[in-house]
Each structure stands twice: as structure tokens, then as C-alpha cells.
Image (cartoon, rainbow, N blue to C red):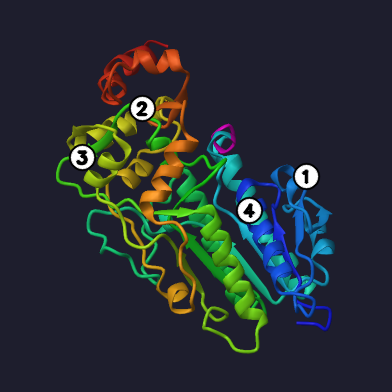
Amino acid sequence: MSSRGLRVAVAEAGSVPGARVLSALVGAARRSGPTSRWASPIGIDAERGDASEVAGAQWRLAAVDNPTVVRSLVGVDVVVWVAATADLAAALAQPSAERRERVVRVAQTLVTAAAAAGVQRLLVVTSAMAYGARSDNPVPLAEDAPLRAERDGGIVGDLLAVEDVVEQARTTHPGLSITVLRPAAIVGPGIDTVVTRHFEAPRLLTVKGAEPTWQFCHIDDLAAAVVAVVRDGGEATSRGLVDARVLTVAAPGWLSQEQVERFSGMRHVHLSEAAALGAAQRLHRFGVLPSPASELALAIYPWAVDPARLNAAGWAAAYDNETCLGVLLATIKGRHALAGRRVDRKDAALGAASAAVALVGTAAVLRRARRR
């Protein structure tokens, strides 16, 4: 840390989560007072987007997937990048190969540019989804649990590709300290993910014999966790976060399927594992499902985490899981989705009473696809 104070930059700060993180960093800098060891946080993106309303931050316009971004990182001590997408509509509008290529390019560019600019620390936000939703997962998962998610063309596969780049960078750039934050299912205004869309369906899908665990992370809690990690690196007395390679972020505990249905007032449709996953695979193959069947597992099997290191350092979530679920339901009000695909109100009515109709219609969809 130089005499001018700790300087933090947020890459892709124009996104919804990037803007919330930038805003939290600005607030932390202001609360530090006139003798602050913080400099004004910096937002870096090709356009300001949602960060246009963040007052008190510096702004550097740059494409984060272009090597010239190194000029925007000169003099920066810490770089924060939220790699996890919170705009599923935009992500699914891209061919999966192009989307994967870009997110890997951004990861590689930021790592290389940060090292070249003399940045001390890089914080990358992926997701606890990278652990994989499995029937044999312990509840909760430890922070150092292996990453067992499917490496397919879905959104979670993108995050695994980012994690691969980060892991390689630890060897290639040993002078750059890298911490990965893996939050539970993110909720908040403007957040659109594979998990939030699960609740846009007329009914919640459940599988016989499976016991899902529902755990959330409010975007403001994620931002507060980033501030805690950054602050720990800028203080004389460390609380153990500065050396952490991986940190999980989540509301305490988790909700059972029964609790989720009771709090949300939603009903479920019950299918066998073979019927649900088999139909989902076929629907995805013929372009009806926007995401691969592996992501359906996120709503079926457990993947709850324990933010032990953050809790031990004094961070605590301000939002519990019940409140997060309420926030999620409020943000999706008026939206309708069948098997993850957005539909308008009229189309949703055609789905009758439950998302099962979408699965029951698989045979007809396949017949039409084969005729085409």
C-alpha cells in the first residue's frame, strides 16, 4: 500500500453486481474518515451501465477483455471482478461457445494485466454452484471441497473455466495474491440467474428421494464480504482473509423444500429423477431448454456452503435465507418461465397449472423437431 492510500478497482463495474460492489467500496472509503487509508474506488468497464448512479468513484473507460486495460490498472492495489453472471437473458442470447470464449478471455486478460501493472491482489467472484449439486454432497460443503460441477456448455461450466484460469495464474504469477469468493445463489434487484428463474415457473420441480437445500446470498452481503476482504488486506492486523485462497459467502443455514414452499406459497410437481433429467436433456438438445440438464440439479440436490472464514473474521450476513427468498420473489413478480425459458403471461397460461406440462410435452416437441 502506497502513501496515497489503498486503491481498489472494480472490473466490469457497469454490471448490476459490479455496481453494488463499487458502491459498497465507496461507502467503506467514506466511513473511514478524513485520515482514511483508502483512496477513491475506481470503476472499470467499457460503459458505466448500472454504475452510472454510483457517486464518489473514479471512472476509467476500458474494455476488460483487451490487453490495453493494463493502463487502467496502473497505481491500483486491489482488483475485484464479479465473474458470475447476474443477467441470464443477456448470457443466453450468446452462443455458448462465444460466451465461454469471452469470459475466459476476460479472466486471462485481467490476470495478466494485473500482474503487469503491479497489482497486489485480485478478488474473483464465481459461485458456490462450482462445487456442483450432488445427491452425496455433505451439508454444508466446506470451502476447500472439490469442484464437482459438470463441465458442459452451461453458465456453471463458464465459471469452472474461470476457476481454471485463476488456478493456473497462481503458478504463472506468484507475486499476485488471488482470492476466489463463491457466494450461494445471489438475489437482489436486477439479479437474473438460473436459480431465480426456477421460481418463475408455475410450480417448483421436486424429484423423488432428493432433498434440496435452498441457500441464498443477498447482493449487498456479497458486496460487504468484498469490502471485508479488501479491508483486511489494507490493515496492519490481518484477520486471516488476506491469505485465503477461497471464501464462501452465504446467509446462515439453509431452507428445506418444505420451508421454501411454505414461505413462497408455491406448490411443487413431483417427478422421478430419470423423468426430470432425461426430459431436460432432450429439451435442451432440441433448443427448448436454454440451459443444460446439469443446471436443473441445482434445484434438486444440495449445494449449501458454510462461510466459516468470513464469519471467523467478523463478517456476518445481514439477510437471512427467509428474507432473501422474499427479495427473490419480489424481484420476479410478474415474470413467468417454463423450464428456465422466459414466456409472457399468455404463454404461461398455456402451460396450465404446473411446469410439468412443459415436460409432458417433450414427446410432441421431439416429433416436431424430427419432422423439421
- For label 2, the residue is 283
Question: Which is in the foreground here, disc 3 or disc 4?
Answer: 4
What amino acid is labelled 3 in the image?
Val
Q: Is residue 28 magenta?
A: no
Q: Quadrant of the N terminus?
A: bottom right
Quarter holding residue 372: top left
What amino acid is labelled 2 in the image?
Leu
Q: Main secondary structure of the magenta part?
A: helix
- For label 3, the residue is 207
Binning the other alpha carbons within 10 Å of mark 2 as few (below 14), some (14 to 19) or many (20 upward) gives many
| Residue 47: numbered disc | 1
Question: Which is in the foreground here, disc 2 or disc 1?
Answer: 1
Q: Helix, strand or loop at disc 4?
A: helix
Binning the other alpha carbons within 10 Å of mark 1 as few (below 14), some (14 to 19) or many (20 upward) gives some
In this rendered view, identify the residue nearer to me: 24 or 170: 24
User: Counting residues from the N terminus, which is met first, the one under dot 4 or under dot 1?
Assistant: 4
User: Counting residues from the N terminus, which is met first, the one under dot 3 or under dot 4?
Assistant: 4
Cα distance in 3D space between marks 3 and 4: 35 Å
What amino acid is labelled 1 in the image?
Glu
Q: Position of residue 188 (x, y in %)?
A: 52, 46
| Residue 20: numbered disc | 4
Asked if disc 2 and disc 4 are in contact, CB closer than 8 Å, the reply is no
